[in-house]
Image: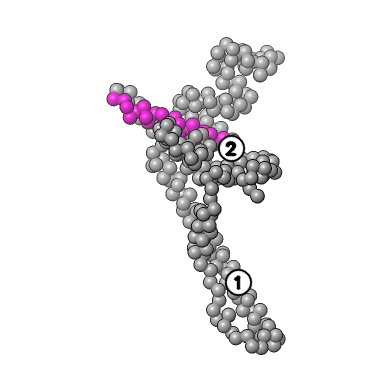
């Protein structure tokens, strides 16, 4: 009845109330899709956990990259649950559970490939999701209780090797490019300083200047400067300052000014 022309007279939201009160799961799912209620759809697909539901979740990521972190977190939870169940089973159902776990891990790898192409979610956040730190959420650095660690759903490292390796290689190339640009800029500054001294000497503005500075151009120790900056950041770091939460909210917020004002009022930024 939900697909015929008369259902339009009721309205989708009214129809949703009716099907929910009647516990009509198929109709509820149909209306979730029609109303584009992504969180509720993901809840329903994750609860089912079947291959068709997982493919639907991946398809939703294609059209809306923002929910990819949520989908990946649910995949990690599903895979971790299946793997923990398989580890304690000795029955004939072991093979089927193991096969399903492998299929979910393959889906996670597909989601990682999608994340690499879309470049919407930061790699650090993806790594934490794979480590079981909530569904796309950061966890408190101070939360190290044994109960929290036991409840984490994680996946084997092999699932993320290709993704992590690619990200590290891209980062290495980007760092090399930036270092080359800095060194080129340093050489240009040295050349400019030498030319300025030559012009000043030629105009007799600096008659007593010894030609030593041009003979020993300044060289930048980029690695040393970076290590010095990192050392200063570590000394000034305070676990109580939620700067990580600030940058995460800045990435996800549509109103950047509101986010900055809110964290400024808390004293996180100054």
For label 1, the residue is 188
Q: Quadrant of residue 247?
A: top right
Q: Residue placed at 53% from the left, 50% from the top?
A: 237
Residue 16 rendering spot, x and y as whole percentages:
62, 17
Total numbered badges shown on the rendered structure: 2
Residue 224 rendering spot, x and y as whole percentages:
49, 64
Is residue 70 rendered to the left or right of residue 34?
A: left
For label 2, the residue is 66
Q: Residue placed at 55% from the left, 81% from the top?
A: 215
Q: Quadrant of residue 254?
A: top right
Q: Residue placed at 33% from the left, 29% from the top?
A: 87
Q: Which residues are magenta?
A: 67-90
Q: Quadrant of the N terminus?
A: top right
Above or below — where is 161 with respect to 154?
below
Residue 63 rendering spot, x and y as whole percentages:
59, 35
Q: What's the image's color scheme? A: one colour
Q: Is residue 78 magenta?
A: yes
Q: Is residue 60 magenta?
A: no
Residue 92 rendering spot, x and y as whole percentages:
30, 23
């Amino acid at each position: 009845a939900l697909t015929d022309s008369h259902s339009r007279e009721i309205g989708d939201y009214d129809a949703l109330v009716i099907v929910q009160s009647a516990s009509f799961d198929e109709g509820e799912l149909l209306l979730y899709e029609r109303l584009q209620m992504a969180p509720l759809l993901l809840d329903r697909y994750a609860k089912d956990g079947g291959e068709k539901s997982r493919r639907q979740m991946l398809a939703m990521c294609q059209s809306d990259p923002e929910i990819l972190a949520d989908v990946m977190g649910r995949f990690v939870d599903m895979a971790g649950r299946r793997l923990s169940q398989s580890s304690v089973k000795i029955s004939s159902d072991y093979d089927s559970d193991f096969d399903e776990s492998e299929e979910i891990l393959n889906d996670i790898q597909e989601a990682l490939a999608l994340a690499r192409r879309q470049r919407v979610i930061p790699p650090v956040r993806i790594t934490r999701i794979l480590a079981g730190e909530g569904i796309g959420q950061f966890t408190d650095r101070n939360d190290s209780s044994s109960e929290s660690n036991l409840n984490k759903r994680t996946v084997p490292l092999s699932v993320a090797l290709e993704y992590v390796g690619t990200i590290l290689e891209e980062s290495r190339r980007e760092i090399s490019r930036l270092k080359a640009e800095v060194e080129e800029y340093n050489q240009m500054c040295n050349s400019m300083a030498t030319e300025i001294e030559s012009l000043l000497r030629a105009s007799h503005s600096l008659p007593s200047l010894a030609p030593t500075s041009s003979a020993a151009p300044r060289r930048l120790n980029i690695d040393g400067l970076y290590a010095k900056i990192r050392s200063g950041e570590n000394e000034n770091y305070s676990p109580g300052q939620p700067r990580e939460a600030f940058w995460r909210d800045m990435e996800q917020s549509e109103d950047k000014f509101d986010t900055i004002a809110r964290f400024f009022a808390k004293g996180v930024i100054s």
